[in-house]
Image (spheres, rainbow, N blue to C red):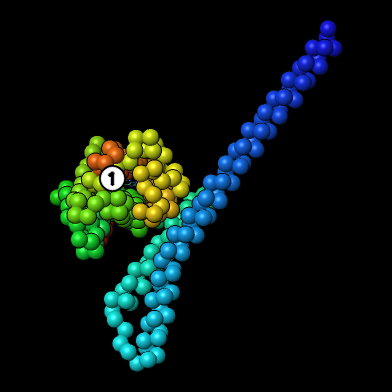
Amino acid sequence: SVRELEMWSAAASQLAVAVENARLLREAQAALRVREEFMSIASHELKTPLTPLKLGLYSMERRIAAGQPVELASVLKSKRQVDRLAGLVEDLLDASRLELGRLALNSAPLEVGQLVAEVVDHFRHAFERPFSVEVPPDGVWMLGDRDRLEQVLVNLLENAHKYSPAGAPIAVRVERTGEAARIQVQDHGIGIPGADQAQVFQRFYRARNVSHRNFGGLGLGLFISHSIVKMHGGSLALCSREGEGSTFTLDLPRMAAHEVRRLPRRVLV
Ligand code: ADP
């Protein structure tokens, strides 16, 4: 009867609402778990450099009070820990700026080859590892935020270094493609398992072959880099094989020859 039909349809829609509520609850619980897990990892990551830093400073204080010399090596060690802390805090701030849409670019014409060569040079001096760099001799120009692009390069090189065995070479190449300034960073490190490759650009995501104990990290670097590259109208892609290595390819819209010719002289020199 019509009455019975109405009852069944009311029951069916109530059931649908209940199923939907249960799904929403599961989602909210999962989101909470992710957040709690993140809080615990973030606190651990922040605390790791803080403990030795505190001990180091206390011991320097004692030495100075006792009229003993403080070794440069201990100061440098503390400085490295402060740098690491500052880097973590900066990444957390950038991730939140991105989430709130408050990260703005400050773009100007720049030559990609020179920027890349400078960053690679810095890594050569900081680490005992062969870093090679190839850039086109006649320059590749683009409109971009120099500091933010430098941040992306530093992140890609830091990852290549962190996830590679000691002594393995890292190669950086800049080339001009049809419409892009292409930068590639290639390492021969641990690689990224196929199943994780699509997710590594997501916030907080870390591949299953990196454990929090062996390699510190918050899983924010690639999320921030990918976002900065997208804001420039570019793309960031990866090609990797677990156990063999990874190549990250960064394509940024480059300026055409006639646009470069129109740049004021003071920019070009
Ligand atoms: P973090 O290094 O702090 O974990 P990132 O966002 O920079 O965070 O990278 C996310 C994840 O991508 C890393 O945890 C790691 O699993 C993987 N990854 C990134 N770069 C490399 C690389 N060069 N080699 C191997 N794995 C990498």
- In this image, 219 relative to 162: left or right? right
Identify which residue is drawn at 51% across, 51% down: 38
Identify which residue is drawn at 43% across, 53% down: 218
Residue position marked by numbered label 1 in the rendering: 190
Instruction: Pick the quarter of the image with the N terminus.
Output: top right
Q: Amino acid at mark 1?
A: Ile
Quadrant housing residue 45: bottom left
- In this image, 154 relative to 97: left or right? left
Identify which residue is drawn at 35% across, 53% down: 214
Of residues 229 and 256, the one nearer the viewer is 229
Can residue 269 be spotted in the picture?
A: no
Question: At numbered mark 1, what does the secondary structure look like: helix, strand or loop?
Answer: loop
Percent x, y of residue 192: 33, 41
Can residue 41 be spotted in the picture?
A: yes
Among all residues in the image, which is located at the extreme right?
3
Instruction: Pick the quarter of the image with the C terminus.
Output: bottom left
Of residues 136 and 13, the one nearer the viewer is 13
Q: Does any atom of ligand 1 lie closer than 8 Å to the CB of label 1?
A: yes
Of residues 123 and 78, the one nearer the viewer is 78
Identify which residue is drawn at 40% across, 90% down: 65
Of residues 18 and 233, the one nearer the viewer is 18
Q: Judge whether 82 appears above or below 43 on screen.
A: below
